[in-house]
Amino acid sequence: MEQVTAVVVAFNRLEKLKTVIASIEAQTRRPDRLIVVDNASSDGTGEYLATVQSSLELDVLTLSENTGGAGGFSAGMARAYNLGADYVWIMDDDCYPNPDALRILIDGQRDAVEKLGPEVPFSCSLVLYTDGNICEMNNPETTWDWARLIASGSRSVMVRSCSFVSVLFPRWVIEKHGLPYSEYFIWFDDHEYTLRVTRACPGVQVLDSTVVHDMGDNKGVNFGLIDHKNAWKFRFGIRNEGSYRLHHESLASYLLFFARVQVVMLRGRVERRLRWSMTKQLFRAIGFNPRIAFPSRSSIG
């Protein structure tokens, strides 16, 4: 039977993390191992993980500093790979999978491989907000022929990219395409990685595999909503996406992104000082181009 390892990246959300762990333990198809990446939390997460009694094989990876979601997922996926996982199932510490989420993801991945071929790089869940509506932050980018599998009787749509909120990656994807860019820290790391791995074949969103994302406000990324509270996230996101557009697409793509950020900020009446801060990140993107890292083969178990 194929070995599935769940990876949860945690940072200062202890009470939500407890719910995530309980939700994973309650799966009808339980993962064979649970890796929790503690991103240098300061809210008692480390102490809790040191004493918690889980019904799963629990592996705690404690990082010496907060490396953001990007660094946490990169470290957790490498750990899962090196421990021999056949599938790696990743999510944030505020993602609550419904009991059949993993079983249906695995079935959906197998169905997609049967119909599209062996290069299907991932399957992801339908992400709902706490009120039952779709989570605006976590809508995948569909392909032009997104309904091809539905037409053949499947309950999946074809996607080019998705967020790291319940995604199942086969082992070969990490072997071939490496890890997410840890240097991104937060925002756009998931988009870049899933775009990277879908160049040959799309992934799928399995509609009957559902999770609840217990985030703050149910809002997507909108450059017109930048304020002093959320600006730190947008600085990373704008730098990261600018880097991707320039170094992995084209100069024209970068310039169009540059213009779009400026126009949307102006329309949203973002404060001038914040607009300049974001513009500096667009220029920083020119010299920011991380290299793909691969997990060490020396510790594969």
Image (cartoon, rainbow, N blue to C red):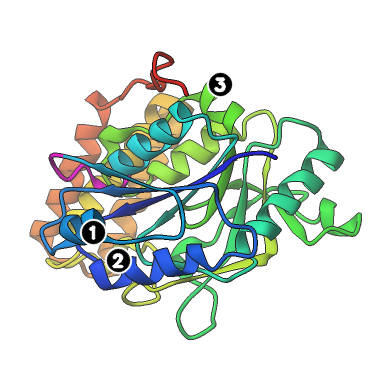
Point out the frontmost of discs 1 and 3. 1
Q: Residue at x 65, y 67 (%)?
A: 100
Dominant secondary structure, magenta: loop
Q: Residue at x 49, y 64 (%)?
A: 25
> Eyeballing the image, is 301 above or below 5?
above
Q: Which mark is residue 37?
A: none
Label 2 or label 3, whichever comes before in sequence order = 3
Q: Earlier in the sequence, mark 2 or mark 1?
A: 1
Q: Is residue 107 above or below residue 61?
A: below
User: Mark 2 Cα within 10 Å, few/some/many (few <14, many 20+)?
Assistant: some
Name the one closer to the observer, 235 or 122. 122
The local secondary structure at tag 1 comes to helix
**What quarter of the picture does the N terminus occupy?**
top right
Q: CA distance from mark 2 to mark 1?
A: 44 Å
How far from the left and from the top, in percent, is residue 256?
Answer: 41, 42
Residue 51 marker: 1
User: Disc 2 residue type?
Assistant: Gly
Residue lying at the far top of the rendered structure: 298
Q: Which mark is residue 224?
A: 2
Query: Is residue 65 magenta-colored?
Result: yes
Helix, strand or loop under label 3 = helix
Q: Is residue 269 left or right of residue 3?
A: left
Within 10 Å of disc 3 (Cα), the crowding (few <14, some 14-19, many 20+) is few
Tags 1 and 3 touching, CB below 8 Å: no
| CB-based contact (under 8 Å), mark 2 and mark 3 | no
Between marks 2 and 3 in the image, the one whose residue lies nearer the viewer: 3
Residue span colored magenta: 64-69
* 232 displayed left or right of 237: left
